[in-house]
Image: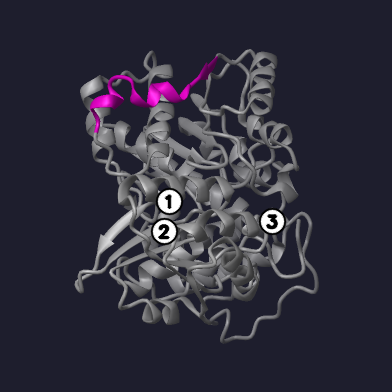
Amino acid sequence: MTYSEAIQCLYGLRWFGAKLGLHNTFKLAELAGNPQDRLQFIHIAGTNGKGSTAAMLESIYRAAGLRVGLFTSPHLVAFSERIQVNRQLISEDDVARLVEEMDALLHRGGGSRVPGAAAPDRHPIAGGEAQPSAPSDDHPTFFEVVTVLALRYFAEQKCDLVIWETGLGGRLDATNIVTPLVSIITNIQYDHQKYLGETLASIAAEKAGIIKRGIPVVTGADAPEALQVIAETAARQNAALTLVPAALAHAPPLDAVRLPLLGEHQKMNAAVALAAVRALAGLIPVGEPVIRAGLAGVHWPGRLQLVTLPSGRRVLLDGAHNVGGAEMFAAALRQYFGSARPALVLGILRDKDWPRMCEILAPLAGRIVLVPVHSERTAEPHGLAEVCHRANPAARVVECPSLADALRETRGEPFVSIAGSLYLIGEAMELLHLSPATAEDERALNEWTAPGHVG
């Protein structure tokens, strides 16, 4: 199987939609030899900050000399961003090999072959292989297959520790087949209510599903109704609970660390990461100089990332993909850029609370350019325009058919911010040549609900 064919196989898995539940993942992991049993994990759930906290932990433990796996989602540009060892992306050859092996396991396990998984002499798309007539409820999804693929890779690579980020929720997320050394719940805010519930308590119950019996848990959550659920779950599981109050974000050694990531919220993420490191000190001791070095060297693109283009124009990129993220982006813009009113390029998914996000972000801008996100779930720019105009009547509001058009529209602006979706940020990084474009279009692999099927 070539890399191109592997990517097409992964696209084929989108046909099976998104399903919450662990049965398929446990079964597939067993077929793969249960690679999770040969690994150690830090498991991270939460509404916002999971990726940044994961990146910080990876950097700290790599600075300590460990061989560290990192599993995150979504990717910005390339699928391989999801699976890294010591911040080296999984190679195209390994992706092709492992996808082929996973397809063989699916076939051996009694399921149908992945749509698009053609014979070696037949390209899956050019060959015109037919899709199945309907999705199969017991066929592993894209995320389930990728989760086990990552476990196999990390086991092959003999990782000392894997920083393991949940995809959606926690309790029924495919990543929850592991038993970690410590569990982390970064925070609890509103997002994915369709799947996780309409209250902070119900969302917290899903996130707290990663808490395992006797395994310590760390959280930076501060909403009382969410904290109550987390505390009750930890007590039932006899799991030692560490609460990380906001004050710890400015306590030693964090008061002396200059984080490369902008935003007060990143200091809170660092406090949560530090609490997890301390919770594991008896198993994996790490000195404070190493912690400081790891935090000072952390890299996590697309999150309040400020770049200066050759023209001198500044561009601020931030996913800000839900209400909590929008509030953090707005606070950072005020903190670091004062009275500056950038041109705001905004694209949001329609299953987010986009009216509230527009109300938060529009007043910050001198000019607002609205675009569709490259996703089946995009909110239409026209709907965003109405809310943005009400929220900031003084700003000129423009609708553009694409992000490329929006970048042309704003090329005379000295300061541009792009926000609203990590999918949009990935597209911006390609268009602005901040990340190499892939030969395959891999960004759409992030679409975790297939057309016509919500599992």
Q: In the image, which disc is placed on residue 18?
A: 3
Residue 363 sits above or below residue 158 on the image: below
Of tags 3 and 1, which is closer to the observer? 3
Secondary structure of the residue carrying tag 3 is loop
Residue at 47% x, 45% y is 328
Q: Which residue is mark 2?
A: 80
Answer whether residue 289 is visible to the viewer in this image: yes
- Residue 452, percent across and down? 77, 69
Answer whether residue 71 is visible to the viewer in this image: no
Find the distance from the CA under tag 1 to the CA under tag 2: 6 Å
For mark 1, does the 10 Å Cα neighbourhood hold few (<14), some (14 to 19), or many (20 or more) residues?
many
Residue 252 sits above or below residue 403 on the image: above
Q: Earlier in the sequence, mark 3 or mark 1?
A: 3
Find the distance from the CA under tag 3 to the CA under tag 1: 20 Å
Q: Earlier in the sequence, mark 3 or mark 2?
A: 3
Residue at 59% x, 75% y is 118
Amino acid type at image mark 2? Ser
For mark 2, does the 10 Å Cα neighbourhood hold few (<14), some (14 to 19), or many (20 or more) residues?
some
The magenta segment: 241-257
Quarter of the view holding residue 228: top right
